[in-house]
Amino acid sequence: EIGLVVMDCALSPVQQRNLEKAFGCKVIDRTGLILEIFGRRARTKEGALQVELAHLNYQKSRLVRSWTHLERQRGGFGFLGGPGETQIEADRRIIQERMTKIERDLDSVKRTRSLHRASRKRVPYPIVALVGYTNAGKSTLFNRLTSAEVLAQDMLFATLDPTARAIKLPHGARIMLSDTVGFISDLPTQLVAAFRATLEDAIEADVLLHVRDVAHEDTQAQAADVHAILRDLGINPDDGQRVIEVWNKADLLDPAERERQLGIATLRPDGSRPALVSALTGEGVERLIRSIEARIAHSRPVYGLELAPGDGKSLAWLHANGEILQREDGEDGGLKLIVRLPPEREGAFTARFPEAERLG
């Protein structure tokens, strides 16, 4: 009575066809299953295009030669020439044309995304991206930090489309938080390529939150898979100044296991200490936010300066190019400010305000 067999490995087209003949039912491999899940989860135009491109790439090599009766036997002139274009070749050509069109559409999406990123760079908010294994709780944590209503469910690949929100940290700094697609072990290479546009947010981020499900029995193996994919993207997962490990789902741990995890966390050096949190209950989130602030402050210079009364032009420049952390209005209308700047704006700032004093 079996209607479908799923193989937890990659199958070549020939293997797939032979197994279907032997079992007498449909057979899909790991890649086919992941693509099937992706197809159901994609919400935005970009997500749908990326999934379709990966799907067509996968299908192209799996066209079964069942259309030979439609071959045009007489190609060319007179009695010369062999068979014309077979149906399988026509199908391949149609798929290739569709893939070329999707790639063009995705290029325009990439350009739009890079323009969004360029405009975000002009508004100098640091970017914090959530990365991690699928179903580790990234979207729940994203919702907890931003009060957003992003789809967060206990299922694989609930998030395919990246979402970004600006949030204000307790000390007044604003950051851009970005939720990304989850990783999975043995992720097929064509999927990594298809979702590269989505993962560019992670590549560009100032701080990465590597969200781990510590209640999962395979948490170490999942972390190793995420590290491998980050290295493929050119990110060093051991960079303590850029990557914060977030040990999520603390609410699912029994008291003894929670104590053990806290003990392991405190053994790590201050700079790379993981944050044990529960995105569902909010436990440990404040400590995580303090860690994010510390990482951002570390990479961005802070200056103190005074502005003359009525110097609105300089104030507007500071608002546009940096973050004003503290403002003190003088009785004469002058301003005492403490500002934090993105590294690329520091040169322009010191040229404009040579009397400013570097505080950190």
Image (cartoon, rainbow, N blue to C red):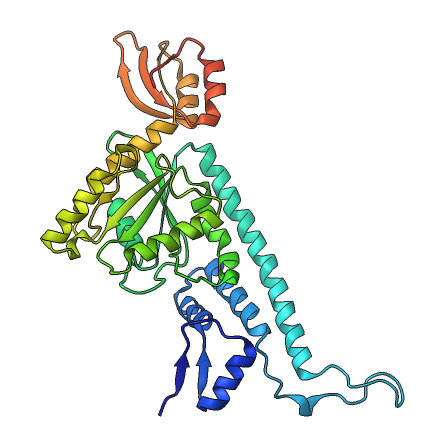
Find residue 205 and report its horizontal and vertical position in percent: 42, 40
Find residue 230 and report its horizontal and vertical position in percent: 43, 48
- Tell me the quadrant of the picture where the N terminus can be found: bottom left
Furthest toward the left, the residue is: 255
Give above or below for 48 relative to 308: below
> Residue at the location (61% across, 57% down)?
104
Residue 79 placement: quadrant = bottom right
269 or 161: nearer the viewer? 269
Relative to residue 337, is residue 204 drawn left or right?
right
Asked whether residue 181 appears in the rendered view, the answer is yes
Find residue 167 and report its horizontal and vertical position in percent: 31, 39
Residue 328 placement: quadrant = top left
How many marks the image carries: the answer is: 0
Asked whether residue 147 appears in the rendered view, the answer is no
Relative to residue 294, is residue 98 drawn left or right?
right
Give above or below for 207 relative to 159: above
Find residue 89 and report its horizontal and vertical position in percent: 68, 78
Residue 91 placement: quadrant = bottom right
Give above or below for 52 relative to 201: below
121 or 202: nearer the viewer? 202
- Tell me the quadrant of the picture where the C terminus can be found: top left
> Residue at the location (46% across, 21% down)?
346
> Residue at the location (22% across, 39% down)?
267
> Residue at the location (30% across, 44% down)?
245
204 or 231: nearer the viewer? 231
Give above or below for 142 relative to 36: above
